[in-house]
Image (cartoon, grey):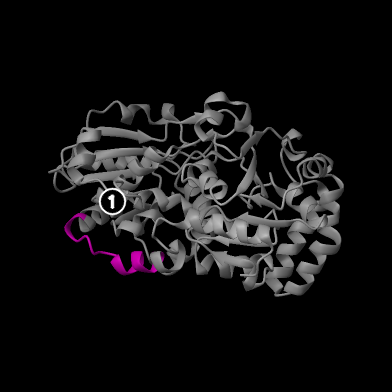
Amino acid sequence: MTHVLLDIHEGQVVRNLLENDLLRLLTDRGAEVMVITPGSRVPFFVERYARPGVIFRSFVSDHTLRDVPTLPRMERYEFYFGIWLCRKGYYGVRRAMWRWWGEPMVTRRAQREKALIADWGPDVVVATHISELNSRCLVAAARRQGIRTVGNLNSWDNASKGLYVRPDIVTCWSANNRDEVCRLAAYRPEQVEVIGAPAFDAYFAPGAQWSREELCSRLNLDSARPILLFATLGQFRKDIDETNPLEVLLRAIDAGQIRGSPQVVLRMHPWSRDAYFGAFMSRPDVIVSRYENYVPGLTWTPTRDEAILAGNLLRHADVVISPGSTMCIETAIFDSPTVVPVFNEYMPEVYDAYFKARWLSKHFGRLHENNWVPIVRSGDDMVAAVNKALSDRSWFGEGRKKIRQEFLGPLDGKATERFAEVILRVASGEAK
């Protein structure tokens, strides 16, 4: 029997993989799976995913016991020097440095991970979010003991954030992701496999494509009026106000400046704060939508039904307006017009600096440089862009096509199946 050790520490990874039947896909092929996750102590979580051949186990890493979860000082030096080496094109040096300095250094503090591996004897160790620290020691310890390892790039922009976990094989969304992993983390092309985005599998499931009328009935919307989906960015910094673009949009609707008497769906990022949006949520013409499911230790943990609702919002929105959330990428799946406001009337200097440093040069860099989405820098420009998108759905259609080609990978609802296939193949030692 194949033994798979699966590390899951993020609620969005639960949505992407467990909600898409990863455990069934593995156990139906004869694998026994140990899932190490904070959710193992939460009864309703275990009940939801329990099945024959699956074991849930709590595991606390050295990283999570720190007051400030970060890399130890010498590992931090190795990590950032590795990034510098990749920028200079010294890929062989980067790989050698990790093998002979970085990985042994990480493994020395991986005592809990070594004991777990010795206790269960996995054939493969799987990290589900390799731009986070959680699986770093586990994968390093497994590799030093000759156990094969797989790691998943959880989202389209994670490679640019740095890979703290370095498995033998990396799975990712797209060919562009594969190139980034090779260029930014010194992987060889044969070590990186394109599987698509498990996060989108639910959008393509049988029965998951609702009509506009069905969506409107569920959310109490008028199917005859335009739907403007405003997706918040998330409160990533306490001193950044993320409400002003929505305020400007609603002000323009009240003044009759946007055609068609539109209705607004306020799609709250899990890290946005309801209290900040309270004045807008109380309006009768604003419908609030969010992920509701929460699991202690995993935080926001969307269900498959919640993901299907999000997909149908993106499918039927007449315009999606968001200051840089990942929904600006997902709209390209459905060719839905998108407007990206990067302004704030109350703190223009702080907002400009924030977006320049965090979004337009990194997270949204290629979209900005190639003019693939309309990025607007004032309220008047946003209103004009929304009206343009309402009158011409094909506006910026070529940009959305480029986003699909560059970032999204296969869109057939089978990314999770491909991930399971990679895990089992690596566990068996088979070549690609």
Magenta-drawn segment: 390-403
Q: Is residue 377 left or right of residue 390?
A: right
Foreground of the two, 139 or 388: 139
- Residue drawn at point x = 76 percent, y = 42 percent: 120
Foreground of the two, 99 or 32: 32
Crowding at dot 1, Cα within 10 Å, few <14 / some 14-19 / many 20+, comes out as many
- The percent position of residue 329, horizontal first and vertical second, equals 41, 56
Q: Main secondary structure of the magenta part?
A: helix
In the image, is residue 210 above or below residue 421? Answer: above
In the image, is residue 389 above or below residue 246? Answer: below
Foreground of the two, 405 or 67: 405
Foreground of the two, 338 or 215: 215
Q: Does residue 160 show up?
A: no
- Residue drawn at point x = 53 percent, y = 28 percent: 47
- Residue 83 falls within the magenta-colored stretch: no
Name the residue beneath numbered marker 1: 315
- Residue 402 falls within the magenta-colored stretch: yes
> In which quadrant is the C terminus drawn?
bottom right
- The percent position of residue 314, horizontal first and vertical second, equals 31, 49
Q: Amino acid at mark 1?
A: Arg
In the image, is residue 35 above or below residue 352? Answer: above
Q: Does residue 213 show up?
A: yes
For numbered disc 1, what is the local secondary structure? helix
